Image: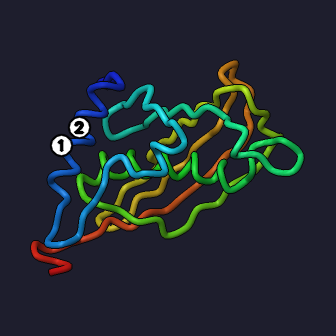
């Protein structure tokens, strides 16, 4: 099992970004939402898992001052996405995503999402993930299925 550094993983994602361009269709890696959430890839185990951290910011809160559920979902999506691209070596799109919210996520902390590949077929990938505090307290879990896209050269022209 090879453990890549965050810098090595970022380099792989940049290289893949240039490979995924098809016709007029532009694929941006990492996506703007990844950057807006100040996400950081902490580690990658080739074809197995990715670990991404996110600071919980004030602009992500619900009326009770906790991280809003949509941002929790976005954090999971921003871990599933890069892992799916690295595993499929092609663009993917989410078919479904289910989230189990276990406890509130307070601001002024960093959360860590570890996403894992559970199964990969010819056209789909099934993944699971956990969101934890930096101290390891479980906050939420998620599952997803992603479709591996077949984008022919010149698509979108």
Q: Residue furthest right?
A: 64
User: Toward the viewer: 81 or 25?
Assistant: 25
Q: CA distance from mark 1 to mark 2?
A: 5 Å
Q: Which one is in front, 38 or 153?
A: 38
* Left-right relation of 66 to 119: right
User: Looking at the picture, how far across and down is residue 83, in whole percent?
Assistant: 39, 45
Judge whether residue 106 can be spotted in this image.
yes
Which colouring convention does the figure follow?
rainbow
Residue 102 circle label: none
Crowd rating for badge 2 (residues with CA inside 10 Å; few <14, some 14–19, many 20+): few
Query: Where residue 71 sits: x, y (%)?
Result: 65, 50
For the question of whether residue 79 can be seen, the reply is no
Q: Identify the residue position indicated by label 2 in the image.
A: 12
Q: Are marks 1 and 2 in contact (CB under 8 Å)?
A: yes
Residue sitting at 29 percent across and 69 percent down?
A: 149
Image-quadrant location for residue 5: top left
- Apparent side of residue 147 relative to residue 96 in the rendered image (left or right): left
> 10 Å neighbourhood of mark 1: few (<14), some, or many (≥20)?
few
Residue depicted at 51% across the width and 36% down the height: 38
Q: Secondary structure at mark 1?
A: helix
Vertical arrangement, residue 96 with respect to residue 4, above or below: below
- Residue at 27% from the left image edge and 42% from the top image edge: 13
Question: Where is residue 49, by image quadrant?
Answer: top left
Task: Specify the quadrant of the image occupied by residue 157.
Answer: bottom left
> At 49% across and 51% down in the image, what residue appears?
33
Is residue 110 placed above or below 98 in the rendered structure? above
Residue in front for this viewpoint, 90 or 29: 29
How far from the left and from the top, in percent, is residue 76?
A: 57, 48
As displayed, is residue 3 above or below residue 51? above
Q: Is residue 121 above or below residue 56?
A: below
Q: Which residue is mark 1?
A: 15
| Residue placed furthest toward the bottom | 157
């Amino acid at each position: 099992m090879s453990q890549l550094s965050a810098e090595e993983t970022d380099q792989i994602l940049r290289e893949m970004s240039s490979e995924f361009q098809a016709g007029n269709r532009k694929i941006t890696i990492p996506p703007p939402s990844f950057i807006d959430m100040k996400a950081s890839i902490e580690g990658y185990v080739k074809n197995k898992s990715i670990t991404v951290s996110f600071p919980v910011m004030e602009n992500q809160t619900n009326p009770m001052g906790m991280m809003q559920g949509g941002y929790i979902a976005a954090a999971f999506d921003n871990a599933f996405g890069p892992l799916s691209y690295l595993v499929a070596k092609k663009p993917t799109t989410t078919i479904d995503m289910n989230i189990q919210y276990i406890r509130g996520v307070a601001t002024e902390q960093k959360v860590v999402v570890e996403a894992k590949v559970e199964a990969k077929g010819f056209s789909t990938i099934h993944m699971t993930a956990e969101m934890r505090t930096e101290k390891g307290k479980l906050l939420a879990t998620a599952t997803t299925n992603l479709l591996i896209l077949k984008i022919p050269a010149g698509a979108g022209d």
